[in-house]
Amino acid sequence: MEKETRPEMPGGDTRMDQAAKGIIHNRQFLSNLLREAIDGLKDCSPEEISGWIRPSGEGSLLPSAARESFSIRNGPLRYDSLFLVDIPGKRSILVNLEIQGRHRPGYSLIKRELYQAARIISDEKNVFFEDSDFDKLLPVYSIWINISPPEELQNTVAKIQLGGCLETGGGEVPYQTDPDLNIIEIRTGDPREAKGSRLLMICGSAFFRGLSGEERKLFLNNFFNIDIDEQLRECLKVMTATLDEEYRSGLIEQGIEKGIKRGIEEGMERGIEEGKIAGYRESVLNIMKSAGWSAEKAAEMIGVPAELYEKIMSEVRAASPQ
């Protein structure tokens, strides 16, 4: 039997993984997130939603949030979080909440999300209903927070909902179905550029690269009235440190890539030696601009050869704004 593997956070960072789960399992954060993500909860207060979440329990964290599905044929599947929301006067809903560390984990993320939602629906039998009493099937909302989307997809939300059409002799007409399967993928971005979307703002506040810890706390507290207790503060601190390190690493890689590309182009015109100098020069300049580092620190980071150091630094100084 093939073992089920979970998508890892970038770099396989378990501290980051635990910090991310600590944030999404914070009841105030979670109730605000559900309010913005699920249409049927938009007119409810976060306080009301928090009281409807099951399992319930004292304290700020959602207890026993992780769940595992086991299939003899398909093997185990572990969820970051799976819980009920008992909405008074309406059907309860099942919510699956996942933190996704990689936009391209080696397979189609949307298909993974569809598969996981289908497993949750399948597992409802003999838990929420028995035999053929399918009318008791609970709606499923599988919500994925993608913390590393490509730049062009940042601050977007992809929604998939079960729907259909009715074919008649006169053509096709919409076929109304209950929204029993709902997938929501939130691609995080800078919350300051969320264009009024509170869903993008709350996710970006917690998980967007490039924000300081204080900025995260201000966004969450000022816009969503989330109390930053010691446990949440520590989770945000770990997220900030890890995301900041990866953010800078990404800028360095981009700077090197742009510098080498431009250097190669110049090298073809002016010769290999001058091309190498141009490549290192552009890499240093790009890193200085992107990461806010000094020329010396950028040169040390990319390993400028000693024999070219003075020449490259002279060109960097000449090209840098005074």
Image (cartoon, rainbow, N blue to C red):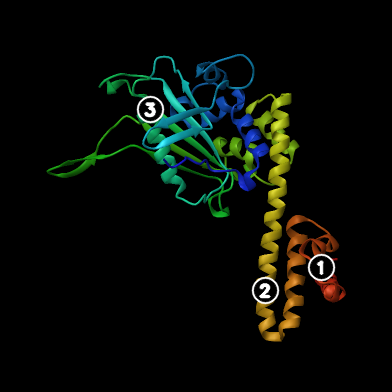
| Residue in front for this viewpoint, 42 or 232 | 232
Q: Amino acid at mark 3?
A: Asp
Tell me which corner region of the image, top left, top right, bottom left or bottom right, holds residue 173. Answer: top left
Tell me which corner region of the image, top left, top right, bottom left or bottom right, holds residue 80. Answer: top right
Separation of disc 1 and disc 3 at Cα? 61 Å
Q: Which mark is residue 123?
A: 3
Disc 3 is placed on an element classified as helix
Separation of disc 3 and disc 2 at Cα? 54 Å
| Residue in front for this viewpoint, 67 or 23 | 67
Q: Which residue is mark 1?
A: 320
Select label 1 or label 2 by which is in front. Answer: 2
Q: Which residue is mark 2?
A: 262
Residue 138's x, y, as percent? 37, 24
Q: Name the side, left or right, on which 94 lies relative to 28.
A: left
Quadrant where the image shows the N terminus: top left
The residue furthest left is 169
Which one is earlier in the sequence, the residue at label 3 or at label 2? 3
Quadrant where the image shows the C terminus: bottom right
Residue 116's x, y, as percent? 42, 37
Q: How many marks?
A: 3
Q: Name the side, left or right, on which 73 lies relative to 219.
A: left
Select label 1 or label 3 by which is in front. Answer: 3
Q: Name the side, left or right, on which 123 lies relative to 216.
A: left
| Residue in front for this viewpoint, 170 or 261 | 261
Q: Amino acid at mark 1?
A: Ser
Q: Residue at x 58, y 22 (%)?
A: 62
Q: Is residue 4 visible?
A: yes
Disc 1 is placed on an element classified as loop
